[in-house]
Image (cartoon, grey):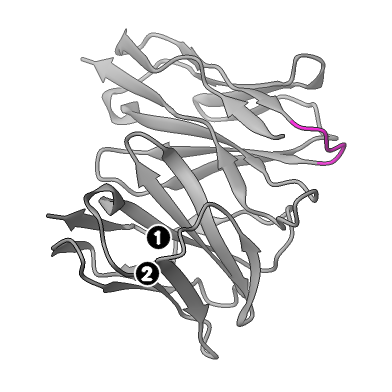
């Protein structure tokens, strides 16, 4: 158990809908990272938050957004969902925002868009 | 640009065989970090090891060992006397560089699926 929690574990929804994925980092960690794992693209970095502020952005679509709250939990919002958004979404956390940090991953949320 | 290549898509071995998973990386950074993660069939990503670019000592942890060679930009992973429980997808990853503003995101290879048969 990495100490990172993600809810829900599974999510099935329809095209055009909006969903919210939730992540709670390990105790004491200030950084939260979101990654998407799909069969064609592999594991890709989406976005990072550090202590409530957006820190880095990767290949995140404009239809997706995230935020980190004062209690350090983070939410990833996916809107106008398309079939291609079906993937496993991981959250990871680390103590700071340094490359020296190890990122510990949550169990993931499997999103299926029908 | 930074890149991680895991040329072996799938490997199948019989229990007790040794197996090496290859990882080749590209980066212009002089300081960087390399990681291995394991993704068992249950789906979670499990951290295995972190290595910085200044430490070229090989590391051994039980049946696992890692060989980091800066000269060939490789960070290979060997499992000795493989077991069925080692069956998983293994990912090599590189910490993001400072160019482009990324702070610490990971760049993953495509993964190597290891199947260990009894």
Residue B28 belongs to magenta span: yes
> Which corner quadrant holds the N terminus of chain A?
bottom left
Numbered disc 1: secondary structure = loop
Q: Residues within 10 Å of mark 2 (few under 14, many from 20)?
A: many
Residue hosting label 1: A106
Using the rendered view, name the quadrant where residue B53 is placed.
top right
First reached walking from the N terminus: tag 1 or tag 2: 2
Q: Position of residue A10 (x, y in %)?
A: 19, 61
Residue segment shown in magenta: B27-31
Left or right placement of residue B56 versus residue A62 in this view:
right
| Residue at 84% over, 41% down | B31
Tell me: residue B68, above or below residue B43. Answer: above
| Residue at 69% over, 68% down | A96
| Residue at 44% over, 29% down | B111
Nearest the viewer among A1 and A111 is A111
Judging from the image, mark 1 belongs to the subunit labelled A
| Residue at 45% over, 10% down | B18
Q: Are marks 1 and 2 on the same chain?
A: yes
Tell me: residue B8, above or below residue A7. Answer: above
Left or right placement of residue A65 versus residue B105 in this view:
left
Contact between labelled residues 2 and 1, with CB atoms less than 8 Å apart: yes
| Magenta span main SS | loop
Numbered disc 2: secondary structure = strand
Using the rendered view, name the quadrant where residue B93 is placed.
top right
Using the rendered view, name the quadrant where residue B82 is placed.
top left
Nearest the viewer among A46 and A24 is A46
Residue hosting label 2: A5
Q: Position of residue B83 (x, y in %)?
A: 32, 22
């Amino acid at each position: 158990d990495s100490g990172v929690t993600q809810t829900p574990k599974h999510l099935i929804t329809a095209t055009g809908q909006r969903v919210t994925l939730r992540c709670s980092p390990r105790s004491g960690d200030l950084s939260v990272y979101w990654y998407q794992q799909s069969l064609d693209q592999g594991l890709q970095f989406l976005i990072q938050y550090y202590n409530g502020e957006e820190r880095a952005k990767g290949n995140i679509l404009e239809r997706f957004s995230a935020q980190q709250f004062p209690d350090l939990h983070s939410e990833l919002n996916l809107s106008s969902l398309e079939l291609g958004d079906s993937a496993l979404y991981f959250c990871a956390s680390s103590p700071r925002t340094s490359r020296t940090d190890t990122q510990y991953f949550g169990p993931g949320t499997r999103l299926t868009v029908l | 640009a930074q890149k991680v290549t895991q040329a072996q898509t799938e490997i199948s071995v019989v229990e007790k065989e040794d197996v090496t998973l290859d990882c080749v990386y590209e980066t212009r950074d002089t300081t960087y970090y390399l990681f291995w993660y394991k993704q068992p069939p249950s789906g979670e990503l499990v951290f295995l090891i972190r290595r910085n670019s200044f430490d070229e000592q090989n590391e051994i942890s039980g049946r696992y060992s890692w060989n980091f060679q800066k000269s060939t930009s490789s960070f290979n992973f060997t499992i000795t006397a493989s077991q069925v429980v080692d069956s998983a997808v293994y990912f090599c990853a590189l910490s993001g560089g400072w160019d482009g503003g990324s702070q610490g995101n990971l760049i993953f290879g495509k993964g190597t699926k290891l199947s260990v048969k009894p």
